[in-house]
Amino acid sequence: MSPKAFISYSWSSDSHREMVRNWADRLIADGVEVLLDQYDLKEGQDKNSFMERMVTDPTVTHVLMICDRIYAEKADARKAGVGTESQIISQEVYRKVDQSKFIPIVCEFSPEGEPCVPTFTKSRIWLNFSSPELANNNWEQLVRLLFGKPLLLKPALGKPPAYVLQDSKAPANPAISRFAVFKQALLQGRTGITLYRNDFLDACFEYADALRVRSTPTSENFVQSVLEVTETLLPIRDLIINWVMLEASTPHAKDFEDTLNQILERLLELKARPKEVNTWNEEWFEAHRLFVYQTFLYIAAALLRQGNFKLLHEIFFSHYLLPETANHGDRFGCFEAFYGYSRTLNSVLAPAGQRLLSPAAALVKRQATRQDLNFEAIMEADLLALLTSALNENVRWFPQTLYYAGYGKVFPLFVRATQHKHFLKLAEITGIDNADELREKTKKGFVRLGIEKWSDFHFYADVSFWTAMNMDKLDTLK
């Protein structure tokens, strides 16, 4: 059902009347039924009766009060038409429990910076239409309000997360609220967006860093605690991916590429030994190693979903500054630095008496909880990582999630690349725009990686990477 709005305003000037009429026309074009004296009050009709009927009519869903200095003065003095109208409005405002019907729209501010509104509306939330730019910026908010379709919806009450039900010492997660603030600032085009972004991302990394092991673990069941920490870090993984999905699809996010590179390097810091730790065991850092590995795959999958192929090329072919505690003499590394594995989780993830081909892959599959990026999307990102590693002599990558691919599995990016227009997307990622050249370099890369010796894929998983990449059919159709 379309909303029905009555516009209450003062005839302050001819230009003000024209502005109100233009707003009415724009609302009508947006599907709002508008009642305006310039259109609906005819010669010979009683204007006071018209105004009272408009305000009290139950079919009128909203009353828009166009507030400027003259409107406020007349309303407070109960003077002239607006004064009579405001008496009716104020009675309705005070009498009704549901007060969402009356919406002040501020067109003018006092010299002290206060909105020019009638006294009886001073405590009400208003919309700022005091300039053409602000009217345009806030127009969507007004229309959404009239249709009852707000930009931000309160989510449905969900199930308590696992870390609430467990006896966990996880810190509070302020990153959730800071992402909401950042998202709103980005979508509204606010200035200083870098500050909002940094505030959010810093909160993510502070939360994850607080969970790093810095002393000898005292837990009797350390393996179980590793699993619990990976579960606790899932909200951070999802917040980072939400950020990537948002900015990868936002044309005006000019510094996103540089920021993403910085975030990837900060992820490497998380999986490394903290600087203050001088005695350690590599297993202490397994939870964060798996978190970084999984997050990297999700970032690649998110960029693929958003069609940001240029940035995919960058993350697969760039060099990253390595943490001081993990560089082993090399200051820079390739994307294989994000690779993660598990030596401990088989005991808690595998069925009794069985051995998992990859506990890390089993964990990624278990924690593939996003609907927009399911486990198949993560396997596709893993396969793309294998392809780019075959093309890069400095990189080795083992696509362990593909243990779950199965015989004859082909993924959407590679299937669509049968057509030339979709092959161009793969070409942008790999930097190779000739399918025959891509096939030749991939074969050489497979030899260098020793794929024929990956017996578990051949004997247990029955996976052919060449087939999964649709190599023989790439760029064979227009």
Image: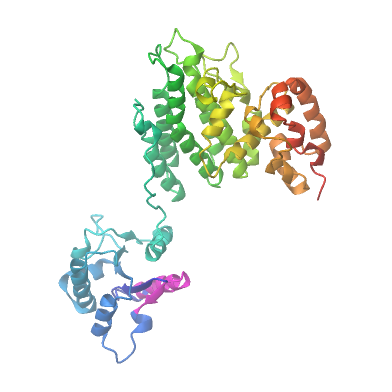
Question: Residue 420 at what x, y percent from top left?
Answer: 78, 47
Relative to 171, is 280 above or below?
above
The quadrant of the image that shows the N terminus is bottom left
Q: Position of 326 compared to 15: left or right?
A: right
Q: Looking at the rendering, which quadrant does residue 17 occupy?
A: bottom left
Q: Position of 174 compared to 342: left or right?
A: left
Was residue 73 drawn as part of the magenta stretch in this picture?
A: no
Question: Residue 134 at what x, y percent from top left?
Answer: 39, 58
- What residue is shown at x 39% (from left), y 44% (from top)? 158
User: What is the tally of numbered marks visible in this picture?
Assistant: 0
Q: Looking at the rendering, which quadrant does residue 100 occupy?
A: bottom left
Q: Residue furthest left?
A: 77
Q: Which residues are magenta?
A: 16-36
Q: Position of 469 compared to 142: left or right?
A: right
- What residue is shown at x 69% (from left), y 26% (from top)? 460
Camera-nearest residue between 282 and 197: 282
Relative to 159, is 71 above or below?
below
Q: Looking at the rendering, which quadrant does residue 403 occupy?
A: top right
- What residue is shown at x 44% (from left), y 8% (from top)? 278
Could one spot residue 265 in this view of the protein? no
Q: Residue furthest top?
A: 279
Q: Residue furthest front?
A: 353
Question: Residue 326 at what x, y percent from top left?
Answer: 54, 15
Camera-nearest residue between 8 and 168: 168
Question: Residue 338 at what x, y percent from top left?
Answer: 58, 25
Relative to 28, is 280 above or below?
above
Name the main secondary structure of what is drawn in magenta.
Answer: helix
Relative to 333, is 439 above or below?
below
The structure's colour scheme is rainbow
- What residue is shown at x 30% (from left), y 65% (from top)? 103
Could one spot residue 226 in this view of the protein? yes
